[in-house]
Image (spheres, rainbow, N blue to C red):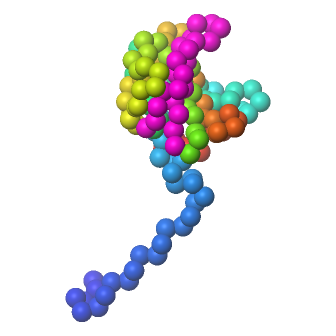
Amino acid sequence: TTPAAEKPKETPPSPDLGGASKAAKMSMPVAGKIIRGYDKKKNQGIDISAAAGTAVKAADAGSVAVISSDTNGSGIVILRHGGGLLTVYVGVDGVSVAKGAKVTRGQSIGKVAKGDPAFLHFEIRNSNKDSLDPMAYLQ
């Protein structure tokens, strides 16, 4: 213990992680096992196994940039976040947000669509639309 008359040692300043600390604050959009990892050439995101109907949650606060579907009819939601980052959610059914709406971290944006297996495809992209490894951003 430190005697009352002595001043406690000052905490050293936090290291500058070059934005990684801000990036690392995103949360998983669904709870589940990663069934397909990131590969910049073959899979520009991660596929997370989850039961159909499971809530898909915003990985971080932002605004809804796009609500669409792919050629297979899989629902797509794209959120815009600070720092020019975009999060992309593919395989979303029953989208519960509107284009332009503000979302909070952890807010439900829809549900995992039916599939065999049912899963959510999740991507993170920078301001140049290049894919980034989501695992570097998720807690």
Q: Is residue 51 visible?
A: no
Magenta-colored span: 61-82
- Which residue is at 57% across, 34% downward? 86
Question: At which x and y percent is residue 9?
Answer: 38, 83
Image side of residue 6 versus residue 78, left or right:
left
Against 128, residue 10 (above or below) is below
Against 16, residue 125 (above or below) is above
- Which residue is at 51% across, 51% downward? 22
**Residue 68 magenta-drawn?**
yes
Image side of residue 11 versus residue 88, left or right:
left
Q: Is residue 41 visible?
A: yes
- Which residue is at 37% across, 30% downward? 107
Task: Identify which residue, 128 or 44, lies in the foreground.
Answer: 128
Question: At which x and y percent is residue 1?
Answer: 27, 83
Kindly indicate the quadrant of the structure image that contains residue 131. Answer: top right
- Which residue is at 41% across, 20% downward? 97
| Prevailing secondary structure class for the magenta stretch in the rendered image | strand
